[in-house]
């Protein structure tokens, strides 16, 4: 995969929610190749919550999850239970994640 394809693939993982460009915690977990998925990302954030402004990291509401699910044409969105916790992280948060131990 060439660099342009990689950039386009990452751009397709970015959503606008609450007027902010964000990635889902599950997406970041895949990008960082976290073996335990979102658990590692969310633990890192929760252990260092004072470093994350509230608009950098937030949990989606049920309505936001429903809207997000409706945007997926295929079943690539794996959250069959709308009560599952889906967190979003702003595009700036990856810099903070790199600065803390996960």
Image (spheres, rainbow, N blue to C red):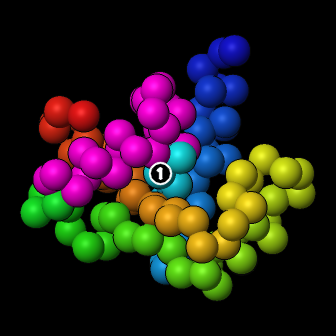
Q: In this view, does 32 lie above or below 39?
A: above
| Residue at horizontal 47 percent and vertical 51 percent from the top | 25
**Residue at image point 34% right, 64% down:** 57
The segment highlighted magenta reads: 27-48
Q: Answer yes or no: is residue 49 visible.
A: yes
Give the residue at x 66% y 37%: 8
Q: Residue 41 at what x, y percent from top left?
A: 36, 44
Percent across and percent down for residue 49 are 17, 60
**Residue 33 point in image, percent of width and height:** 47, 26
Residue in the foreground of this view, choosing between 10 and 38: 38
Classify 41 as above or below 19: above
Which residue was labeled with disc 1? 25
Asked if residue 36 is among those painted magenta in the image, a careful observer would answer: yes
Please tell me how crowded label 1 is: few (under 14), some (14-19), or many (20+) other residues with Cα within 10 Å. many
Q: In this view, does 18 lie to the left or right of 97?
A: right
Q: Check if residue 12 falls in the magenta segment.
A: no
- What predominant SS class does the magenta segment belong to? helix
Going by the image, does 18 lie left or right of 48?
right
* Residue positioned most to the left: 50
- For the image, the number of numbered tags is 1
State the SS at label 1: helix
Quadrant of the snapshot with the N terminus: top right
Q: Residue 10 sits in which quadrant?
A: top right
Horizontal side of 17 relative to 12 (left or right) equals: left
Q: In this view, does 68 lie above or below 64?
A: above
Q: Is residue 95 visible?
A: no
The residue lying toward the viewer, choosing from 14 and 38, is: 38
């Amino acid at each position: 995969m060439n660099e342009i394809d990689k950039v386009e693939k990452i751009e397709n993982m970015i959503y606008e929610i609450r007027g902010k460009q964000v990635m889902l915690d599950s997406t970041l977990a895949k990008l960082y190749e976290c073996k335990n998925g979102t658990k590692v990302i969310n633990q890192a954030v929760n252990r260092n919550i004072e470093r994350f402004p509230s608009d950098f990291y937030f949990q989606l509401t049920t309505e936001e999850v429903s809207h997000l699910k409706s945007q997926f044409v295929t079943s690539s969105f794996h959250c069959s239970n709308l009560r599952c916790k889906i967190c979003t992280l702003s595009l700036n948060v990856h810099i903070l994640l790199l600065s803390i131990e996960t």
